[in-house]
Every structure is written in C-alpha cells, then in structure tokens.
Image (cartoon, helix red, strand yellow):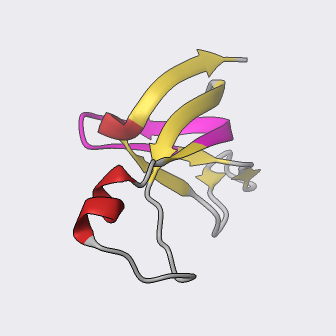
Amino acid sequence: MKIVKVEWKDAVTRHDTSMSLEVAKQEPLADAETIGYLIYEDKEKTIISPFVFIDNEEQLIFPKTLNVIPTKCIKSIIEL
C-alpha cells in the first residue's frame, strides 16, 4: 500500500448568510489535502485511510474514518 498526499477540491456549504444564485455560482470550492494509505482508486472514487489495522491472519481492517473522495475532484496525488 502506498502512503499518499491527495490535493483535491471539496464542496462548500454556507450556513452563515443567505445569497442569490448568482452569488452562489461565484462561491469557490474549498482546497483540501488528505494524507494516508491509498486503499482504492477508480474513475468514480478514491479511498484514503489515515491508518490500518492488521489482524492475526494478516488481513487488513480499516478504521471507521475513511476519506472517500470523488476522483474527478482530485488535483494531484503524490506518493510519500
């Protein structure tokens, strides 16, 4: 498994103000970075885990915290 740094664009949700559609169209997406194990990658999604467990039978067990990133939102993946 590779450890990677993923730079990607995330959705933005605003709760602090009301706005018109024209203003909402101008709202920038958030720049995000995720570092972890590259668990899975296809055209639809890329899955990153911050850590993994290995059980007594050498099987990988993933924690509750997995980042499932839409692959189309990824700007770059750098192997660390």
For residue 19, above or below residue 70: below
Q: Classify residue 62 as left or right of residue 27.
A: right
> 18 or 40, which is in the foreground?
18
Residue drawn at x 61%, y 17% is: 78
Highlighted magenta segment, given as a residue range: 32-47
Q: Residue at x 75, y 55 (%)?
A: 56
Q: Main secondary structure of the magenta part?
A: strand
| Quarter of the picture holding the N terminus | top right
Q: Quadrant of residue 75?
A: top left
Does the magenta run of residues contain 35? yes
Q: Nearer the viewer, residue 17 or 45?
A: 17
**Residue 25 in the image: above or below residue 14:** above
Percent x, y of residue 28: 45, 48
Query: Residue 10, position in %: x, y?
Result: 47, 51
- Identify whether 37 is placed above or below 23: above
Q: Residue at x 57, y 82 (%)?
A: 16
Which quarter of the figure has residue 55?
bottom right
Residue 47 in the image: state x and y as whole percent.
48, 46
